[in-house]
Structure formats: structure tokens, C-alpha cells
Image: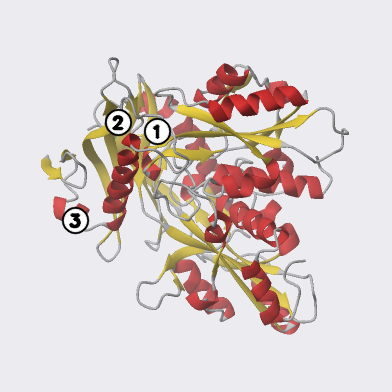
Amino acid sequence: MAEGLISDTDVSVTLIDGLSEEELLQFPAFKNWLQTLKSNLALQSNPSHEYHKSPYALRDIKIQAIDRFGKRIGFLKLVATITNAEGDFLPGSMFLRGASVGMMILLQPDDLPADSQDEKHVLLTVQSRIPAGGLKFVELPAGMVDRGSFAGTAAKEIKEEIGLEIPEGELLNLSELAIPEGEEEETCPRAMFPSAGGCDEYIPIFLHEKRIPREQLGEWSGRLTGLRDEGEKITLKLVKLDDLWREGARDAKALAAWSLYEGLRRTGRI
Amino acid sequence: MATFKLDLFDPPIDVRILTEHVTEEQLMNWNPFTTWAKTLKASLELQTQLDHTGEKHPFHEFPYTVRSVDIQAVDWFGRGKLGFVKLTAKIQNEAPNPQTLPGAVFLRGGSVAMLMILRPSDSNSERWVVMTDQPRIPAGSLRFWEIPAGMIDDDTNDFSGTAAKEIKEETGLVVPRSELINLTELALAGTQVDEGLEDAMYPSPGGCDEFIAIFLWEKVMDRQEIENMKGKLTGIRKQGERITVRILNYEDLWKVGARDAKTLAAWSLYEALKRAKTPQLRALSVRFLVDVLI
């Protein structure tokens, strides 16, 4: 268990076996979180800041656990000590895992008028989610944007089952549309935070709308309904957009997508 | 390193406690851990059964079982309460090429969130929402806006916790259980699911057990009362204040709350249930003598 100061700071860090300071500082999730936190703590030097009289500072970080995906760091569990001169502290226990993306994929028969809202369908995933204790958890597809397109297990399954690939250029970032840039003093990712009190995770919600021949939509729908391949860890489900809030009522990403889509449409932004 | 046999799973499994900060007894007395194990066990049992549509489970040929659990780290909150537990579960099947399911779990249990809507008695459509503004270190922010979160108190059954306390102090508003409408429960009513998941929103089911029941609390008040509250709570936060109560125009909720999963979840459920003319929301109309469904 190594201890030391993070270079160029007076923040001490306690590592765990198998994790070097270098690897920690290069872990994108840690790097980004630390940078965001430092820049927002720095705002306290502004006389009008609510903590100006007794500013909080990051004193130390203790890494408690690490989960690796192969060689790379997947998740970290850490506790950060953030106190002011009075000994008040801000809760600093967190699960660190970094960002991902949520993908709202809307499919509509192309024989309807271009401005029609009818018969829009949304693609959902069904998979095991051990933390939730379920093996058939329904969610909005999640993943990463990697090398120019939506990537990850859900993206792979979508490509395999219906041949749909989603290039970056055909994505609309709904979160960034809803959260204007430059209007806040703080720097904070313009994305949905599932659980900001305990986890750094943030998820921008993207929209990909596609109009396809009616027969194709029917074919895809039929294929996914009939599909129960043995042992498939992830399957897909096509539901009406109108039903997204019910079908996805347990999933933060699905409800976030419904909200952003609805709000942006009502205000004429999309 | 302590090891104990957990017989919540069948067959019983080994739990290795890799931290000195928790004992078997403390873990077994902690509701989130036992709830998670029981929920998972029940879901695993479905693998060998037909579902409610008569279909075989996707994993029926090579069902998964839990082999072991490692408790890696824990955090204790004040007053001797276990707060967070980080564990990994090894979950594998007996396929010729054995498959595993991702088993890293950040355990913290469930909570509640409140969509608190204040309506001036002289308007049919105007609404204001009670929000909290506080530091959220995992988000790297000192000013994170959310709808109020907390717990339902075991004894009083009322909304309780830091946010509830601050709201009561700043506005006098108290939220009794009898006046709450569970939006997630309403949304899920009539949907059939064989797994014993909670009627709640799961912020991050791929990494965390957390589930949040979203409640609605609507109250009609004199416009002046609302204006007084707004006047008291706008502007910069008081020096050193750890959690600040805000009153936000409902029209801005989905934008101002666009970073918060709870806020977007609450807004979507409220809007959709209204649009679907849900009877329980209609009952609010009768109480308030206003049309809640606008």
C-alpha cells in the first residue's frame, strides 16, 4: 500500500496493491474527476462564492478497491477527504467509473409525413444487471462513442441483430442541447449524472432517428420478438415511443431520454 | 481475512471479507446486502422456469450460479450506520466454455426522491418546484441541483433526511407519507415482470444496487406564501451553507434539472401519467379544485 503526494499538489494519496500513482493519474475517470473538482474548488477564491470565508480543500485520497477489465482499470472505490479550516467536511466516498453514453434510437416507417410523430419506436436492451439483482433488466442502450461510432456490447448486438450501425455524425447530443454552455460559473459535464452523491458516472444522452421502410420495421420487430437465442447475454426489444416511460420506468437513462426528447421537442429545439 | 458461508444462496457460498472494517454479523444485519442477495437469488431461480408468457428463460440451458463473493471495502456513516459496501460476486455457468456475468457491485440500498410541487391557488397552470442545491463531490461540483432526496422514516413514515430537514427549516413544509403519490409504482402498474425488482428507478443498474422511488407531493397554497418562500430563497447561497433550498419554476425543471437522473425521471413520469389521465392524479384535482391534468 503506497502513500505519497500527487505531484504538483499537496494532496496525499494512499494507493492499493497493484495500483501505481502513474496508472491512477492516467485513468481517464480519475483524471477528469480531479480536474473538474479542482477547478470548481478554485472558484471559492471569488469573494462572492458561498464558501469563500471558509473554503474547502482536497486533503487526501484513499483508494479502497479496484476492479479491472482485463488489464485496464474498470472501477475504483475511493474516499476523498475534503474539509475546511473549521473541520466541516463534504461527503467524499465515491464509486469512480467514468462516463458512458445513452443512445435513444428512434425508428419510424418512412411512409409517414416527415413531421409526423406517429409510430416512432425506440430500441431497448434486456440484459443481466447483477447489482440490481435482475437477469432481464430493460434499459436504453448504453455504451461508448469510440472511433467515430456508437460502440460496446449493446451497439454490437444492435449491429448483429438488425444490421444497424450508428456513426457519430448521425448523433444528436440531447443533454448538451438542454444544458446551455457558458451560462454557469462551474465547469461540469453537460450530461445526466445517475447518482451524483455517490458516483462520478455521467451519461450524455444521444438521439439517432431513422426512417425506414415499414416492412423493415415489421421485420426487425418480428425478429426481436421471436429471438431467444440460447445464452444470449443481451437481447433487444422494440417498443413504441409512447410506451417508453412505462417500459423503461426503472431505467434512469430511458426516463432521461424521454424527458430530454419531450422537452426539446416542445420548445422547438428538435 | 474472514470468510463465512452465506446460505441466502443455494448452494451456500463463501463470502470473503477483505477489509478489517466490517464483520459477518454487521453485513448480515445490513438490509441492502441481504436484500440484494435475496433479489438475485430469486432472479437466478427463474432460469429454470417458464416466464409469464410461457417462454423459456434465456439462460435455461446453462443457468448461472453465484460461486463466491468478496467484500472489498466499506464506508461507515455517522451513528454507526453502514453506508456503502463495495463487493464483487463471481457468477458463472456450466457451459462447455463457462461464461461469467459482470459481478462488481457498489451497494448502498434504496432511497426516495420527492417531486414537490407548489401551486398558487389563483392559477390553474402555474407550478413551482422545491429543489436542493448542494455540493456533490463525485460530480466535482459544489452547486449541484436536484429534486430533494432522502428516506422514508421507519417510525414516522414521513420524508426525512438532510434535505427534508433543510426544507422544513427554510419553508416550514413537511411531507407526510399520506400525502405522497408513488409515481414509479403508478407507471409500472399493469406491467408484468417476473423478476422481483423494486417499483423504483435504478440510476445505474450495471454497477450499483441503488433504487429510488419517485414520489409526487402537490400542495395548493396562497400565492403570497409562495412568493415569500421564493423571496427568501433566491440569490446566492448563505455563506457556508451545506444544502440550499431553491424554488424553481416548473417550466424550467427539465432543463435546470437535466444533469440529475432523479429530476428527469420525476418530470417524465409526472408528465406522462398526466397525459395518460391517471386516476390517482385526477384524485388530486378533486382535492385541489384545480385541473391537475393540465
Q: Is residue A155 left or right of residue B110?
A: right
For label 1, the SS is loop
Residue at the spot x=16%, y=46% of the render?
B7
Q: Mark 2: which amino acid?
A: Tyr
Quadrant housing residue B247: bottom right
Q: Nearer the viewer, residue B174 or A40?
A: B174
Looking at the rendered image, the quarter that the N terminus of chain B falls into is top left
| Distance between the alpha carbons at the discs numbered 2 and 3 | 28 Å
Disc 2 and disc 1 on one polypeptide chain: yes
Q: Nearer the viewer, residue B101 or B188?
A: B188
Q: Position of residue A100 (x, y in %)?
A: 54, 32
* Dot label at residue B64: 2
| Distance between the alpha carbons at the discs numbered 1 and 3 | 35 Å
Q: Earlier in the sequence, mark 2 or mark 3?
A: 3
Q: Chain of mark 3?
A: B
Q: Are marks 2 and 3 in contact (CB under 8 Å)?
A: no
For mark 3, what is the residue? B26
Judge the density around disc 3: few (<14), some (14-19), many (≥20) Cα neighbours within 10 Å: few
Q: Position of residue B108 (x, y in %)?
A: 36, 51
Looking at the rendered image, the quarter that the C terminus of chain B falls into is bottom right
Q: Are marks 2 and 1 in contact (CB under 8 Å)?
A: no
Q: Mark 1: which amino acid?
A: His
| Distance between the alpha carbons at the discs numbered 2 and 1 | 11 Å
Q: Position of residue B212 (x, y in %)?
A: 47, 56
Point out the residue furthest to the front here: B54
For mark 1, what is the residue? B57
Q: Nearer the viewer, residue A177 or B46?
A: B46
Judge the density around disc 1: few (<14), some (14-19), many (≥20) Cα neighbours within 10 Å: many
